[in-house]
Image (cartoon, rainbow, N blue to C red):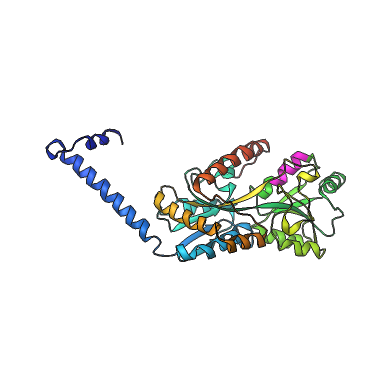
Amino acid sequence: MGKSGNMFQYIGWPQTSCWSFVVLLTLLSTLHITSLSAEAFPERPIRVVIGAAPGGIFDVVGRIWADKVKAQLKSVIIDNQPGAGSERAAAAVANASPDGYTLYLGGPHTNVINAVARSNLSYNPMAFESVSLLGHGSFAFVVHASVPVGSLPELVTYSRQHAGAISYGTPGVGTLNHLTGELFKYATKAADITHVPYRGAGPAFADLLSGQIPLAIVSFMAPMMEFHRSGKIRVLAVTSQHRLDFAAEIPTTAEVGLANVDTQQFVALFAPPNTPRALTMHIASATQAAVAAQDYRDRFAAAGLEIFPDASPAKMDQINQQLSETWEPLIRAIGLKLN
């Protein structure tokens, strides 16, 4: 606290200046008010902004979480605001009142990808307060049934034989889906395949099902296996580090020789800068209680998603640092600019 710390060195009133006494009284009053606010929190619905369309991994995770924590946090409202690589949604939360009633649900693009690829962001991506890790999922390389390939290596060969004829859909430029596609191209030296960005995962998957695009890189969730097993689409590989229980017949990218294409989609909660620690910890505590509940784990597993046993802000900061070290070199290598 600099010089203001000297006021704690004096005990008697005559030795304490009136100004120091006022400062001390103000500080104690502020701490008391913050404590009372944390105890009463929340007194109205908490709004969770998602920079993605309904139907994708962020929306699914957010709604499972919101339903489970309502016992402790009361009402939680999901507010989908897709578009602009999530920048608008993230900026809206970054500029919101730091009172715990507005949160952002996002992933690496929030404070890793945007921080590197955007030079004129309307918010500081490193200033968000970490709240909780909610879960993570894998990506899958999925082709329409009309594409004559049955594995990821066959896709590489097919792309070379049909240079420029293959396109892949994702929820948007700068998403981790998009970067996974670029990482795949870099790792396999495949012929150029054209990126087709959509406004969300739902529209991209819909166009894949209808055959409008031959390939999509999607956040892999259990319901997609119904389309795979019915023959409408073909899931070639999944980017997880192990085969998934709901899709045991689908190989991992590592199993087909692409161990470095093992990307994961992390989903986490952020609060506006300067949100009091007592409030973020209250929300984190509710999340940790949800993680410990078997029905919560079961709902994640049913969707094909996984949870973090440690959902704490400290673990979230550690993951963010690892993601930055992973993705920043690729973003710079491919010259990705999101301005």
Please provide percent x and percent y for residue 266. Answer: 60, 50
The answer to whether residue 118 shows anywhere in this view is: no
- Looking at the figure, which quarter contains the C terminus? top right
Number of marks drawn = 0
Query: Closest to the observer: 169 or 282?
Result: 282
From this view, report whether residue 45 is shown above or below residue 314: below
Please provide percent x and percent y for residue 51. Answer: 56, 56
- Quadrant of res 233: bottom right
> Is 46 in the magenta?
no
Query: Closest to the observer: 315 or 274?
Result: 315
- Quadrant of res 2: top left
Query: Closest to the observer: 56 or 42?
Result: 42
Please provide percent x and percent y for residue 140. Answer: 73, 53
* Residue displayed at 14% across by 35% down: 15
Report the span colored magenta.
Answer: 180-187
> Is 185 in the magenta?
yes
The answer to whether residue 108 shows anywhere in this view is: yes
* Residue displayed at 59% across by 59% down: 61
* Residue displayed at 74% across by 54% down: 216
Please identify the dominant SS of the magenta region: helix
- Looking at the figure, which quarter contains the N terminus? top left
Please provide percent x and percent y for residue 26. Answer: 24, 47
Query: Closest to the observer: 37 or 116?
Result: 37
